[in-house]
Image (cartoon, rainbow, N blue to C red):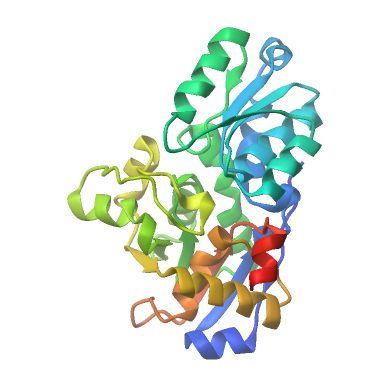
Amino acid sequence: MVRRTPIETSRSADQRAGLRVFFKCENLQRGGAFKIRGASNFLLQLDAEQLRRGVVAYSSGNHAQAVALAARQLGTRATLVMPADAPRSKLEATRDFGARIVTYDRLRESREAIGEAIARETGAVLVPPFDHPWVIAGQGTVALELLEDVPELDALVAPLGGGGLLAGCAVAACALRPALRIFGVEPERANDWHLSLAAGRRVRIASPDTIADGLRAPQPGELTFELLRGRLEGVLLVSEEEILETMRFLLARLKLLVEPSGAVAAAAVLHGKLPAGVRSAGVILSGGNVDLELLRSL
Protein backbone atom coordinates (compact mmCIF):
# COMPACT_ATOMS: atom_id res chain seq x y z
CA MET A 1 0.00 0.00 0.00
CA VAL A 2 2.97 2.31 0.72
CA ARG A 3 5.87 2.91 -1.65
CA ARG A 4 9.48 3.25 -0.47
CA THR A 5 10.41 6.62 -1.92
CA PRO A 6 13.84 7.54 -3.32
CA ILE A 7 16.51 9.92 -2.05
CA GLU A 8 17.61 12.56 -4.58
CA THR A 9 20.70 14.79 -4.48
CA SER A 10 21.86 17.79 -6.49
CA ARG A 11 25.20 19.59 -6.68
CA SER A 12 23.32 22.81 -7.38
CA ALA A 13 21.32 22.35 -4.18
CA ASP A 14 24.46 21.58 -2.18
CA GLN A 15 26.16 24.72 -3.48
CA ARG A 16 23.16 26.92 -2.67
CA ALA A 17 22.73 25.46 0.80
CA GLY A 18 26.42 25.23 1.67
CA LEU A 19 26.00 21.63 2.85
CA ARG A 20 25.10 18.17 1.58
CA VAL A 21 21.36 17.92 0.98
CA PHE A 22 19.46 14.63 0.67
CA PHE A 23 15.87 15.03 -0.51
CA LYS A 24 13.41 12.35 0.67
CA CYS A 25 10.88 12.35 -2.18
CA GLU A 26 7.48 11.79 -0.63
CA ASN A 27 6.10 13.75 -3.58
CA LEU A 28 6.57 10.43 -5.44
CA GLN A 29 4.57 8.50 -2.84
CA ARG A 30 1.24 6.83 -3.66
CA GLY A 31 -1.44 9.52 -3.59
CA GLY A 32 1.29 12.11 -4.13
CA ALA A 33 2.21 12.66 -0.47
CA PHE A 34 3.45 11.05 2.75
CA LYS A 35 -0.09 10.92 4.16
CA ILE A 36 -0.77 7.41 2.86
CA ARG A 37 1.65 6.09 5.49
CA GLY A 38 -0.40 7.30 8.45
CA ALA A 39 -3.79 6.68 6.85
CA SER A 40 -3.00 3.11 5.86
CA ASN A 41 -1.49 2.32 9.26
CA PHE A 42 -4.65 3.63 10.95
CA LEU A 43 -7.03 1.67 8.74
CA LEU A 44 -5.00 -1.51 9.12
CA GLN A 45 -5.68 -1.41 12.88
CA LEU A 46 -9.47 -1.50 12.38
CA ASP A 47 -11.46 -4.71 12.77
CA ALA A 48 -13.90 -6.11 10.23
CA GLU A 49 -16.95 -4.47 11.84
CA GLN A 50 -15.32 -1.05 11.88
CA LEU A 51 -14.32 -1.42 8.23
CA ARG A 52 -17.87 -2.41 7.38
CA ARG A 53 -19.14 0.89 8.85
CA GLY A 54 -16.68 2.93 6.81
CA VAL A 55 -14.41 5.84 7.67
CA VAL A 56 -14.64 9.63 7.68
CA ALA A 57 -11.88 12.23 7.70
CA TYR A 58 -11.36 15.97 7.27
CA SER A 59 -8.54 17.44 5.25
CA SER A 60 -7.51 20.17 2.82
CA GLY A 61 -6.39 17.50 0.39
CA ASN A 62 -3.51 15.10 0.95
CA HIS A 63 -4.93 13.32 4.01
CA ALA A 64 -8.25 13.13 2.17
CA GLN A 65 -6.62 11.43 -0.81
CA ALA A 66 -4.69 9.09 1.47
CA VAL A 67 -7.77 7.97 3.42
CA ALA A 68 -9.74 7.53 0.19
CA LEU A 69 -6.94 5.45 -1.33
CA ALA A 70 -6.43 3.31 1.77
CA ALA A 71 -10.19 2.77 2.09
CA ARG A 72 -10.41 1.63 -1.53
CA GLN A 73 -7.51 -0.79 -0.97
CA LEU A 74 -9.27 -2.30 2.05
CA GLY A 75 -12.73 -2.35 0.48
CA THR A 76 -14.44 0.13 2.79
CA ARG A 77 -16.37 3.38 2.22
CA ALA A 78 -14.82 6.80 2.87
CA THR A 79 -16.42 10.21 3.40
CA LEU A 80 -14.08 13.21 3.24
CA VAL A 81 -14.82 16.67 4.63
CA MET A 82 -12.84 19.15 2.50
CA PRO A 83 -12.81 22.96 2.29
CA ALA A 84 -14.70 24.33 -0.68
CA ASP A 85 -11.58 26.26 -1.70
CA ALA A 86 -9.26 23.23 -1.59
CA PRO A 87 -7.07 22.87 -4.69
CA ARG A 88 -9.23 21.46 -7.47
CA SER A 89 -6.66 18.77 -8.27
CA LYS A 90 -6.94 17.42 -4.71
CA LEU A 91 -10.74 17.45 -4.77
CA GLU A 92 -10.81 15.62 -8.10
CA ALA A 93 -8.20 13.05 -7.08
CA THR A 94 -10.05 12.28 -3.84
CA ARG A 95 -13.30 11.82 -5.76
CA ASP A 96 -11.52 9.61 -8.31
CA PHE A 97 -10.48 7.25 -5.49
CA GLY A 98 -14.18 6.60 -4.89
CA ALA A 99 -14.78 8.75 -1.82
CA ARG A 100 -17.85 10.85 -1.01
CA ILE A 101 -16.89 14.49 -0.53
CA VAL A 102 -18.61 16.96 1.78
CA THR A 103 -17.39 20.54 1.35
CA TYR A 104 -17.42 23.32 3.95
CA ASP A 105 -16.48 26.99 4.36
CA ARG A 106 -13.18 27.03 6.27
CA LEU A 107 -13.81 30.60 7.50
CA ARG A 108 -17.28 29.96 8.90
CA GLU A 109 -17.57 26.24 9.68
CA SER A 110 -15.64 23.72 11.76
CA ARG A 111 -14.36 20.72 9.85
CA GLU A 112 -13.92 18.84 13.12
CA ALA A 113 -17.56 19.36 14.07
CA ILE A 114 -18.75 18.27 10.63
CA GLY A 115 -16.58 15.16 10.66
CA GLU A 116 -17.67 14.19 14.17
CA ALA A 117 -21.33 14.67 13.24
CA ILE A 118 -20.98 12.40 10.20
CA ALA A 119 -19.25 9.78 12.35
CA ARG A 120 -22.09 9.86 14.90
CA GLU A 121 -24.81 9.69 12.25
CA THR A 122 -23.30 6.90 10.16
CA GLY A 123 -21.21 4.94 12.66
CA ALA A 124 -18.10 5.56 10.55
CA VAL A 125 -14.69 5.65 12.21
CA LEU A 126 -13.08 9.10 12.31
CA VAL A 127 -9.49 9.10 10.96
CA PRO A 128 -7.63 12.12 12.41
CA PRO A 129 -5.22 13.92 10.06
CA PHE A 130 -2.31 14.02 12.52
CA ASP A 131 -3.08 13.85 16.24
CA HIS A 132 -3.33 10.09 16.78
CA PRO A 133 -0.67 7.49 17.71
CA TRP A 134 -1.47 5.22 14.73
CA VAL A 135 -1.22 8.11 12.26
CA ILE A 136 1.98 9.45 13.85
CA ALA A 137 3.59 6.00 13.83
CA GLY A 138 2.82 5.55 10.15
CA GLN A 139 4.32 8.92 9.24
CA GLY A 140 7.46 8.07 11.20
CA THR A 141 8.40 5.42 8.64
CA VAL A 142 9.66 8.29 6.44
CA ALA A 143 12.55 8.83 8.88
CA LEU A 144 13.20 5.09 9.20
CA GLU A 145 13.73 4.84 5.45
CA LEU A 146 15.75 8.05 5.27
CA LEU A 147 18.18 6.98 8.00
CA GLU A 148 18.55 3.51 6.51
CA ASP A 149 19.59 5.10 3.21
CA VAL A 150 21.67 7.98 4.65
CA PRO A 151 22.62 7.02 8.23
CA GLU A 152 25.19 9.75 8.94
CA LEU A 153 23.03 12.85 8.61
CA ASP A 154 23.62 15.86 10.86
CA ALA A 155 20.04 17.15 10.64
CA LEU A 156 16.49 16.24 9.69
CA VAL A 157 14.29 19.01 8.26
CA ALA A 158 10.55 18.62 7.66
CA PRO A 159 7.42 20.77 7.25
CA LEU A 160 5.13 21.50 10.19
CA GLY A 161 1.36 21.64 9.85
CA GLY A 162 -0.47 19.67 12.50
CA GLY A 163 2.83 18.00 13.33
CA GLY A 164 2.08 14.34 12.58
CA LEU A 165 4.89 13.89 10.05
CA LEU A 166 7.63 15.49 12.11
CA ALA A 167 6.42 13.98 15.40
CA GLY A 168 6.61 10.48 13.97
CA CYS A 169 9.94 11.17 12.30
CA ALA A 170 11.39 12.77 15.44
CA VAL A 171 10.43 9.82 17.66
CA ALA A 172 11.96 7.36 15.19
CA ALA A 173 15.07 9.47 14.51
CA CYS A 174 15.81 10.19 18.18
CA ALA A 175 15.64 6.47 18.94
CA LEU A 176 18.07 5.63 16.14
CA ARG A 177 20.29 8.74 16.21
CA PRO A 178 19.97 10.65 19.51
CA ALA A 179 22.44 13.32 18.33
CA LEU A 180 20.49 14.13 15.15
CA ARG A 181 19.44 17.79 15.01
CA ILE A 182 15.74 18.13 14.15
CA PHE A 183 14.15 21.22 12.62
CA GLY A 184 10.58 21.99 11.64
CA VAL A 185 9.66 24.53 8.98
CA GLU A 186 6.47 26.52 8.50
CA PRO A 187 5.40 29.55 6.46
CA GLU A 188 5.80 32.96 8.07
CA ARG A 189 2.05 33.41 7.62
CA ALA A 190 1.26 30.14 9.45
CA ASN A 191 3.64 30.36 12.41
CA ASP A 192 1.59 28.65 15.13
CA TRP A 193 4.41 26.20 15.98
CA HIS A 194 6.98 28.97 16.21
CA LEU A 195 4.73 30.92 18.58
CA SER A 196 3.70 27.83 20.56
CA LEU A 197 7.24 26.64 21.26
CA ALA A 198 8.27 30.15 22.30
CA ALA A 199 5.29 30.34 24.68
CA GLY A 200 5.68 26.80 26.02
CA ARG A 201 2.03 26.04 25.22
CA ARG A 202 -0.16 25.53 22.16
CA VAL A 203 -1.06 28.86 20.58
CA ARG A 204 -3.97 29.23 18.14
CA ILE A 205 -3.70 31.73 15.29
CA ALA A 206 -6.29 33.05 12.85
CA SER A 207 -6.90 30.93 9.76
CA PRO A 208 -3.57 31.36 7.92
CA ASP A 209 -3.46 32.84 4.44
CA THR A 210 -0.59 30.96 2.82
CA ILE A 211 -0.01 29.24 -0.48
CA ALA A 212 1.05 26.16 1.52
CA ASP A 213 -2.52 24.89 1.91
CA GLY A 214 -1.46 21.69 3.69
CA LEU A 215 0.10 23.71 6.54
CA ARG A 216 -2.93 25.81 7.45
CA ALA A 217 -3.73 24.06 10.73
CA PRO A 218 -4.18 27.02 13.11
CA GLN A 219 -2.77 25.23 16.16
CA PRO A 220 -0.34 22.36 16.85
CA GLY A 221 -1.88 19.03 17.74
CA GLU A 222 -2.10 18.17 21.43
CA LEU A 223 -0.17 14.90 21.12
CA THR A 224 2.22 16.13 18.43
CA PHE A 225 3.13 19.20 20.50
CA GLU A 226 4.07 17.06 23.49
CA LEU A 227 6.14 14.73 21.31
CA LEU A 228 8.01 17.54 19.59
CA ARG A 229 8.56 20.19 22.25
CA GLY A 230 11.55 18.34 23.71
CA ARG A 231 12.90 16.98 20.45
CA LEU A 232 12.92 20.01 18.13
CA GLU A 233 15.99 22.20 18.03
CA GLY A 234 14.00 24.94 16.35
CA VAL A 235 11.28 26.04 13.94
CA LEU A 236 12.43 27.83 10.80
CA LEU A 237 10.17 30.28 8.94
CA VAL A 238 10.01 30.84 5.18
CA SER A 239 8.28 33.49 3.09
CA GLU A 240 5.74 32.90 0.34
CA GLU A 241 8.27 33.94 -2.31
CA GLU A 242 10.91 31.60 -0.88
CA ILE A 243 8.41 28.74 -1.16
CA LEU A 244 7.58 29.57 -4.78
CA GLU A 245 11.21 30.07 -5.75
CA THR A 246 12.07 26.68 -4.24
CA MET A 247 9.28 24.99 -6.20
CA ARG A 248 10.75 26.47 -9.38
CA PHE A 249 14.27 25.36 -8.39
CA LEU A 250 13.19 21.77 -7.64
CA LEU A 251 11.30 21.52 -10.91
CA ALA A 252 14.05 23.05 -13.05
CA ARG A 253 17.13 21.49 -11.46
CA LEU A 254 15.95 18.16 -10.02
CA LYS A 255 12.92 17.63 -12.29
CA LEU A 256 10.80 17.18 -9.16
CA LEU A 257 7.25 18.52 -9.02
CA VAL A 258 6.63 19.56 -5.41
CA GLU A 259 3.60 21.34 -3.98
CA PRO A 260 3.99 24.47 -1.79
CA SER A 261 3.58 22.59 1.50
CA GLY A 262 6.06 20.00 0.32
CA ALA A 263 8.64 22.64 -0.60
CA VAL A 264 8.86 24.54 2.71
CA ALA A 265 11.57 22.34 4.26
CA ALA A 266 13.70 22.64 1.12
CA ALA A 267 13.05 26.41 1.09
CA ALA A 268 14.52 26.77 4.56
CA VAL A 269 17.64 24.79 3.66
CA LEU A 270 18.20 26.42 0.25
CA HIS A 271 17.72 29.91 1.69
CA GLY A 272 20.26 29.48 4.46
CA LYS A 273 17.93 29.17 7.47
CA LEU A 274 19.79 26.30 9.15
CA PRO A 275 22.25 27.27 11.92
CA ALA A 276 25.99 26.96 11.49
CA GLY A 277 27.58 23.56 11.95
CA VAL A 278 25.12 21.50 9.92
CA ARG A 279 27.12 19.70 7.22
CA SER A 280 24.41 17.38 5.88
CA ALA A 281 20.63 17.41 6.06
CA GLY A 282 17.81 15.07 5.17
CA VAL A 283 15.00 17.20 3.75
CA ILE A 284 11.49 15.78 3.42
CA LEU A 285 9.63 16.83 0.27
CA SER A 286 6.28 15.93 1.75
CA GLY A 287 3.99 16.13 -1.29
CA GLY A 288 3.66 16.84 -4.99
CA ASN A 289 -0.01 17.54 -5.62
CA VAL A 290 0.12 20.87 -7.46
CA ASP A 291 -2.82 22.55 -9.17
CA LEU A 292 -2.23 23.08 -12.87
CA GLU A 293 -3.19 26.75 -12.47
CA LEU A 294 -0.42 27.24 -9.90
CA LEU A 295 2.03 25.30 -12.06
CA ARG A 296 1.30 27.59 -15.00
CA SER A 297 1.92 30.66 -12.82
CA LEU A 298 5.40 29.41 -11.94
From this viewpoint, is residue 259 visible? yes
Residue closest to the eye, 88 or 20: 88
Q: Is residue 109 left or right of residue 124?
A: left
Find residue 108 and report its horizontal and vertical position in percent: 42, 32
**Res. 110 image quadrant:** top left
Question: At 42% across and 38% down in the image, what residue appears?
Answer: 107
Q: Is residue 142 left or right of residue 169?
A: right
Question: At 49% across and 84% down in the image, what residue appears?
Answer: 17
| Quadrant location of the C terminus in the rendered image | bottom right
**Res. 70 image quadrant:** top right
Q: Is residue 3 above or below residue 292?
A: above
Question: At 52% across and 31% down in the image, what residue appears?
Answer: 128
Q: Residue furthest left?
A: 199
Residue closest to the eye, 52 or 81: 81
Find residue 19 and report its horizontal and vertical position in percent: 49, 85
Find residue 253 and report its horizontal and vertical position in percent: 68, 83
